[in-house]
Amino acid sequence: MNGNKNAPIFALNNIRKSFADVPVLEDISLSVEQGNVVSIIGPSGSGKSTLLRCGTFLETADGGDILYDGEYAMKDGVYVDKAALRKFRSRFGLVFQNFKLFPHYSVLKNIAEPPMLQGVSREEAEDRAMGLLRKMGLEGREKAYPSQLSGGQQQRVAIARALAMNPEILFFDEPTSALDPELTGEVLKVIRQLADEHMTMVVVTHEMPFAKAVSNRVIFMAGGVIVEQGDPISVFENPQEERTRQFLRVFEH
Amino acid sequence: MSFIAMVLKMSEGLGRTCAIFFLTLLFSLPLGMCIALLRMSKNRVIAGVTRFVISVLRGTPLMLQLLAVTYGPYYLFGFNVSRNKLIPVVIAFAINYAAYFAEIYRGGIESISKGQYEAAEVLGYTRLQTFMRIILPQVMKRIMPSVTNEVVTLVKDTSMAFTVSYQEMFTIGKQIANSQTSFLPFVVAGVFYFVFNAIVDYVMGRIEKRLDYYD
Amino acid sequence: MKKLLALCLTAAMVLALAACGGSTSGAGSSASSEQAAAETEAAGETQTFVMGIDPEYPPFSYMDDDGNYTGFDVEICQAVCDHLGWEMKVFGVNWDQKLVQLDAGECDCIWSGMTIVKSMKESGYVISKPYFYNTQVLLVKEDSDITSADDLAGKSVAVQLGTSGESLLQEDLADLAATFGELVTCDSFLKCFTELDGNAVDAVFVDLPVALSYTAEHEGFRIVNEELGAEEYGIAFRSVDQVLCDQVEGAIAELVADGTYAQIAAKYPDIVSNLIFLNE
């Protein structure tokens, strides 16, 4: 790895993105250090998900830089090498709001196939998958198909699937928003467990208590810009910006 | 001519009927996929031309296409008419059915959510791997009922090979009917087709069931 | 089928008649129409000519939608009678029994797309000159090495479905058909010829008039000089009615000469090319 040891694992510089001339992200910069958990909160339509999608190349930013380990994936709104994006993809994992498991694959195959396509042996990939399932509290469900699982179980499989690629950083795009309230706990518990193991993570979430408890840093976004960021205590208990206070007030009731 | 002799004579043609059927499926199923992919091409010219070709193939009778493939090269360029009629017959059938399969595939592919592509992309799947491993298997399951319909139609359409004098089962039946001034060969043909399709139904049902391992 | 059946039955009947010719009313024993004609003419009455037809043999003789007998033969006969100043009557015979009915005087002729069979002449019936001719020939490309039906062994031959050629190959000429490499049944003559021109078949088995008109319009084809399954249609009269036959033939010749014959024939395009008088 030719990345700088001191460089952040993930960094965005001045990211811009518009959809049909409507700006969604305006000049966003952030960086995530090794072992940190960063939560991104904010109202719907504030650009949180778009930010994650730009960082994971699902959307192409209009301008700015994207760096992994100090290495440019995008510079000034241009991918440095389109063919090399695959190399960058292996450094991160992404957990979607709607799980997006492959319905025709068993749980085991969902988790084991992606590493196998990267050259990991079947034996090793399946061993790793079984270990992750145990960790996710899904022992014995490896032969099940996604449709036979609850939403919470599916999302835990999706997390295992992302982890199976041994990512340096894990992105979560509202991982509990599609779940029934009684099922969010099991997913949040897993994420918390990963945080305890110092997994580097960026979590877009509406779960304020969770963000407050788990994060090293909280970013509040609104209208396509970062309004405020800092450690959870200061953002949640002593917000500097009126916009932040307004947003947090809604959650107190 | 005894009833038994009639059935035996028509059975001779049944082999040719089967040849049309299986060879058409063999070529049209993959060809249909190629056409579907061209039809969904981001290049507007390719997509537009393909769309036009599909509409011609679906908008003109198979019988005309059989004539065009069999005799067209002769009328246009003076080429020899093929002695082995199975060749032009299978070409015409395969192209025609590919057009129908292409639209079925397209419908199936477009019904798969964008999320499946995105999930595969971030997990490092190449475009080909995404299509072959993630999209296609799901498409297959969804389109099976429509494909079964086409396959059943194909069994009956084989009789159209008569247009270009390919001596398949129904052609022989017609000849016997003519010389014997009897309607019986048509009844026999009807029974043949029905049994053929009963087998097709059974096989397609088994395939659908095998694809039904997930919801 | 029907024609063949009729032929067999006729032949059988003629044999039966010949066998007991002495005792029963064999050909010629009944009253001559000539005598009758002479008598009626003397009496100043119009002669009546009774035409014996198969009422279900289009396009030669059949019943039209209004219930009147018509058809090519019926129309020609009407023209003949008009020409000779006779009154015409149509009598529908039972085709299997037609010669018996002719002998019995129920009609004066059998004139209805009747195939001339050798045995008719042998039994003494007066048969007109054939007026309709049909035969199957082989149409090949000019440079083909096929010169007779024997050369067809192993070759590909096309025939049109539903034609007499096709029935012949399935029945009378089945032995010949068995020597073919392949018998290709097309649903139109055009396709037969296209197959031939496009070298997909080596010969087309086809009605002579069709082959004639095709070779007249297209170059590069040749008709093999061998007729297969030839047949001719004629008019049968009682053995004593040679004069009557001559009168009818004479009238037909004049109708041919003045164009009436062709006019009537034009209404029956399917058979025009096989009419001997118009294609001589």
Image (tube, coloured by chain):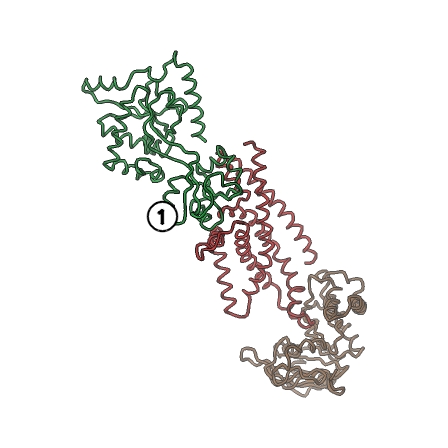
Chain colours: A brown, B red, C green
* Left-right relation of C169 to B20: left
Mark 1 = which residue?
Answer: C217
Q: Would residue A253 be seen by someone viewing this image from the given angle?
A: no
Q: Would residue A228 be seen by someone viewing this image from the given angle?
A: yes
Image quadrant where residue B114 sits: bottom right
* Left-right relation of A28 to A1: left
Image quadrant where residue C75 sits: top left
Q: Is C58 situated above or below B154?
A: above
The C terminus of chain A - image quarter: bottom right
Protein chain holding label 1: C
Q: Nearer the viewer, residue C162 or A192?
A: C162
Q: Position of residue C225 (x, y in %)?
A: 41, 39
Q: Position of residue C116 (x, y in %)?
A: 38, 28
The N terminus of chain A - image quarter: bottom right
Q: Position of residue C269 (x, y in %)?
A: 34, 40
Amino acid identity at mark 1: Glu
